[in-house]
Image (cartoon, coloured by chain):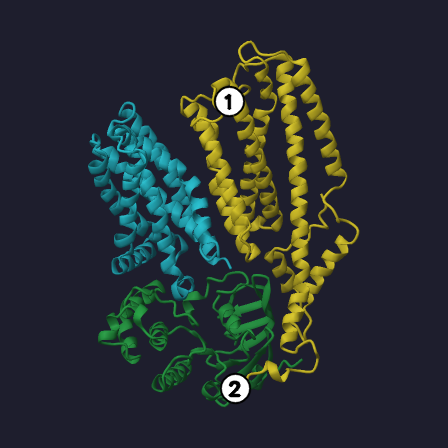
Chain colours: A green, B yellow, C cyan
Amino acid sequence: MEPVIRFRSAVAFAGRFPVLAGVDLDVSGGDVVLLRGANGAGKTSILRAAAGLLRVVSGEARVLGSDLVLDQRAVRRRIGLLGHTSGLYDDLGVSDNVRFALRSSGVSSDRASCALETLGLVGRLADTPVRSLSAGQRRRVALAVLLARDPELWLLDEPHAGLDADHRDLLDGLVKSAASRGRTVVIASHESDRAEPLAGHIATVAGGVVVEVAPGPACRGSEPAEVERIVA
Amino acid sequence: MNPKADTEAGSIDRVREGGSQPPLGSGKAEPFAHRVAQGASSSSGRVTGTSDRVTRILGGSTLITAALTAWLGLVVTPPDKVQGQLVRLIYVHPAVATMCYAGFGLCALASLAYLWPRTRTRRWDRLAAASAEVGVVFCVLTLVTGSIWGRPTWGVWWTWDPRLTITALLCAVFIGYLALRRTGGDPDALAKRSAIVAVVCVLLVPVDHEATTWWASLHQTSTLLRANPLIHGEQLYTMLLSFVAFGLGFAWLVLHRYRVEVLEDRYADEGFDNAISERRAEGGVLTGAGPRSDGVAP
Amino acid sequence: MWRDALLVGSKDLRIEFRSRVTTTQVAPYAVLVLVLFGFAFDQDQNLLTKAAAGLFWVAVLLSSLLAVQRSYAIEATDGARDSLRLSGLDPAGIFLGKTLAVVAELLVLEVLLGFGVVVLFGIELHDPALLVVTCLAASVGLAAAGTLYGMIAAGLRVRETLLPLLILPVVAPVLLGATQAWMAALGTAGGGTDGWKWLSLLISFTVIYVAAGSLAFSILVEES
């Protein structure tokens, strides 16, 4: 089966700086992959490239069977990215934001209420403008959008940042249940103690390349052929 | 032209070259090494400046035709019954204004070619940049020569005549275009933005051209493009020669400016190879000793 | 495409409704511009009446710059632009939606400014049909050109200074057409038949800007 993400020598630039300097990465369906590495190693850029926000200018980049080098838009609606920024409108209320995000990705806004409830964004919070929320609450709103959309590929960038202990546990649960439903999850995080137990595979990123891929604690004994070791 | 020296920096070419390369094994950036090597080989000894035989011939013939136009226009042709000596500006002003249109028109055509995915290469972007800049120069010259002509004939340096006003707007529009080109950032994104602006801006050219007929304007209508041209004989030939002279000068300027763009692109490209290897070295890939301890999360 | 346009347009208007930037800042600014024109012309009522159409449209033009900048400021907050790209909305729909929202704001402003010129500059309205159609066409033209250029300048460090330089000369034909049509309608220029001729110039530019924006947005949204 074709991997959900397949990068080969993927190079991408931010201005004239090569944020990705030849990334090789395979992520197979239903796997949870942790990207770890120092700040500025290229973790976020890998996620943005996979979401089609950062253009891969050379090499191969295929996500969910589509060639991102040729068409970045093709897979957008099948991917969810939880980024550093929440992508929310400051002046809109929580539920308005979620409803707009869902409708603009072609999902019925009926699914909003269930997700909002799961993330504890009900009652007074539902109508509060996002402007007056804390960073952790914003993160929860963005997570509610992701949960309601339930895309085939979840890209989570430092998902634990800003969340309190209860919601971190909730997030871990959501990731596990997504994987059990056959969703593919890629997490970029430097909080190894938190994210590692979730991971089927752990990829180490440094200098804009993936330097090592190793099986993680949650590896479900998938075929060893898919565990690719690229060590210089 | 010099196709080999014209190494493309466009992402499409990068993609093509990159796509045919085998996956990277251990820290070699073949596509870029290949691309930069090609650029280096063609640059060695070939293009160090922006002139070659073509530009020298163009420049020389510009000088000759301009001198001939000056001699015919100032000495041979007679003064006008109504305008007197001032009529001699007809050997400068219309040709300059036409080159201004030519510059903006060429810029818009090159931009359209860049926007069309099948013909998208950096050449069109460079041509657009070069011709817009030359067009702005000729647009300013148009306003200046027109002003010089306007003072004695209309009695004012400037008047809010539609033709003048729209020409001034045209100048402002393309100065804005050039300002946009200087904003930097991702070169491909910038090229696309600029191309869109150029195509929208050029819409003012037909309005400007028709201004004399749409509005009952002070500015006189075309002298040549009518069934019965207003001037004949040596005046007509001198005027036509002025178009040739300024046309050659226009081509000469655009060609030089285009080559400056090529050199600038090459200068920027030479950084790519180093940038990639430096980036990889951050992760310890090129040192050959496996991941450095400081490149890995704690 | 139209579904996406309505979605984006209603989102922008809802944000405007909640933040009230247009009503509390842009509208007072527009009226202030009119009042300042009055100062500048030094109580010469006759001159003001004659120039009313031009002054009205200059005030609309300046306000439209603010409206466009505001329209992109809301997209810039906290990565909203990325989420718009990720959502897979039709780029032409995004363009039309944002344009429609700006049109709605401009129409409100024009009603306000219309009262302003009637009260402050003492003019009489003769040809309401021509006035209203001109307002509609000019608003769409200004909003479309502004939204297109706003997207071009979006994300650039120098957008605040670059945007007016880019927009003002390009919308000059719209300003010209609208002013002349209004002068005809207000009776401050030649015969009333002239107005509809100017309106056709205005409409042709509006159509061009809307078409150019719809086509260009797919390129602009996907860059970088």
Describe residue A228's horizontal placement relative to residue A28 as left or right. right
Amino acid type assigned to the residue bearing label 1 in the image: Gly
Name the residue nearer the viewer: C45 or C159.
C45
Q: Is residue B231 above or below residue C62?
A: above
Quadrant where the N terminus of chain C sits is: bottom left
Q: Chain of mark 2?
A: A
Q: Is residue B122 above or below residue B25?
A: above
Residue C177, percent across and down? 35, 33
Q: Measure the C-alpha gap from mark 2 to mark 1.
A: 84 Å
The residue pinned by badge 1 equals B150
Marks 2 and 1 share the same chain: no
As displayed, is residue A195 above or below residue C44? Answer: below
Q: B285 or A72, which is in the foreground? A: B285
Q: Position of residue A167 (x, y in %)?
A: 35, 83
Q: Look at 31% across and 52% down and name the residue there.
A: C101
Residue for badge 2: A222
Residue shown at 60% from the left, 80% from the top: B295
Say whether residue C208 is left or right of residue C13: right
Q: Position of residue B175 (x, y in %)?
A: 52, 42
Res B206 seen here: no
* Kind of residue sitting beneath label 2: Ser
